[in-house]
Image (cartoon, coloured by chain):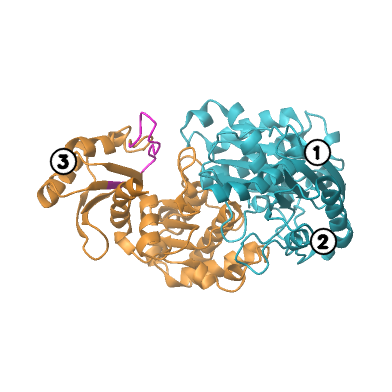
Chain colours: A orange, B cyan
Amino acid sequence: MFGGIEAGGTKFVCGIGTGPEDLETTQFPTTTPDETIAQVIGFFKKHAGGKLKSIGIGSFGPVDLHPDSPAFGHITNTPKEAWKNFDLRGAVLKALDVPVEFETDVDVAALAEARWGGARGVSDFIYMTIGTGVGGAAMVNNRLVHGLVHTEMGHLRLPHDRREDPFDGCCPFHGDCLEGLACGPAMKARWGKPALELPPDHPAWALEANYLALALANLTFALSPRRFLLGGGVMQQPHLFQLLREKFARVLNGYVRHGDILDRLDEYIVPPQLGGRAGVLGAIALAGTTSRDENA
Amino acid sequence: MFGGIEAGGTKFVCGIGTGPEDLETTQFPTTTPDETIAQVIGFFKKHAGGKLKSIGIGSFGPVDLHPDSPAFGHITNTPKEAWKNFDLRGAVLKALDVPVEFETDVDVAALAEARWGGARGVSDFIYMTIGTGVGGAAMVNNRLVHGLVHTEMGHLRLPHDRREDPFDGCCPFHGDCLEGLACGPAMKARWGKPALELPPDHPAWALEANYLALALANLTFALSPRRFLLGGGVMQQPHLFQLLREKFARVLNGYVRHGDILDRLDEYIVPPQLGGRAGVLGAIALAGTTSRDENA
């Protein structure tokens, strides 16, 4: 039995199980570290006392992912003051005394989609969420990309034609990066109402598809993935997927000559399959890697 | 003893050896496939007849890198008509009857820098050349990134302020992508003379550094590399490296909080170390992977 913690900026989801079939979860709002961690510990002690083999955490970030770093498992540079430099992994480890694996929230969601969802059998793919923020994870040769820190796909810099779209962008660091131009709050700031209230024929969607297409093109040029999974609040509109595929083809302009891109974009740019459970399932999958590594 | 072939669009370099210490090379211009391959075969038969364990090829592209594809080892969609769909690997394999490994030209140069050059011991890095064209290779978790096809970093889409730089870009596919804005021919078209003739205080260099900084920022967001190696004709100017580091820091704006980026950019964005020999050395390194795989 594994434990999983999806540590989000708004809510924490805790789960116990081995996969989608037997997963049991609970969730509570993210408040202070002390209070939130006490609830996490309480849940696992009550429902799995002594039975957990290991725990996986998928955390909001930025985080330190390097096991040899003194800050491994810490949330680092977050605007949430109370969580800045908080040793999330250490707090769980100390209270529950089982192995604790640690990843970003998008990384574990990608792990879950790779194991049980829309990326089964796909060695190289990109998972993105476009919602309040924009984040992404990349799998390359069946392994997550970490590198120096971790990816920050929400901050890709894109062409921005200010005659067509005079909105300055809302990213406090970069202004008109991908997140600054295309996240949910950017849509709301630009059009005066939430994305969900904009009808499918509103020009907001063509503009949104344009920025997402440019971002996906850049990720294709940088990583050549075999599939894109796109989730998050903004993507809950089937018409946006079709618009995005058309714009993506137009941006690439036939340059990348592979049937999956030239002829089968409806299987290349797709929604994830695990919905709201991807995070906590991915944390469970991550917990399972501890024992898998021992057997490797 | 290994054989290496750097198959470039302008010239072919063939080498025999095991590394930088004992490498012997020859080179000739790229003409027709028949004529060029005859010279390649002649070189290896004359200088290494019967002694070669395997051959590595690093080829100009686009190419098919997937061993299970019918077009594996072919040059595919090149504007060089005579080479379009040419089975480069097959031609070498048929004539010399030893194992033949196949990669892109930038991928093998990255392999060489990883083994003998500026990326020794670096698990995740990006190697780019900025010259007549712009190309790049990425190493992630010590393995080259291939994915669906291969990376095409020269075609990243970037912010392009036409008030500051009205040049339309020269990429026949995308106009003002990275290559279209920042390759050697783009500099020449924009300023009326070759990059090499522009003095260090010419505004061309600040603009060039700006585009390269945006591209490196996008690659940092997509891949989080531990180092960038930048070569090619345009990068043969020490002052450009310094300008680029300054602009890169300004584009990231403190968002990626790691000492290597915040404090040590002079070790993070660097020239490669193997110069003109990186391609053929990488082909030799690639040839060596055949026997290494057997032992794995």
Mark 1 to mark 2 CA distance (whole Å):
29 Å
Mark closer to the chain start, 1 or 2: 1
- The CA distance from mark 2 to mark 3 is 66 Å
Q: Name the amino acid, label 3.
A: Ala
Type of the residue with mark 1 = Glu
Q: Position of residue A228 (x, y in %)?
A: 49, 62
Query: Which residue corresponds to mark 3?
Result: A38
Q: Are marks 2 and 3 in contact (CB under 8 Å)?
A: no
Task: Give the Cα distance between marks 3 and 1.
Answer: 67 Å
Asked if marks 3 and 1 touch (Cβ < 8 Å), the reply is no
Q: Position of residue B254 (x, y in %)?
A: 49, 33
Residue at image x 41%, y 66%?
Answer: A118
Q: Chain of mark 1?
A: B
Residue furthest toward the left? A46
Q: Which chain's residue wears label 3?
A: A
Q: Residues within 10 Å of mark 2 (few under 14, many from 20)?
A: few
- In the image: residue A205, left or right of residue A257: left
For the point 77% across and 50% down, which residue is it?
B50
Q: In front here: A47 or B239?
A: A47
Q: What is the span of residues highlighted in magenta in the rendered image?
A: A56-73
Q: Is residue B45 above or below residue A272?
A: above
Considering the whole magenta stretch, tell me its main secondary structure.
loop
Q: Residues within 10 Å of mark 1 (few under 14, many from 20)?
A: some
Residue at left offset 41%, top offset 69%: A237
The circle drawn on residue B24 is: 1
From the top left corner, tell me how far across and down residue A151 is, in percent.
Answer: 47, 45
Q: Which residue is mark 2?
A: B80
Whether labels 3 and 1 share one chain: no
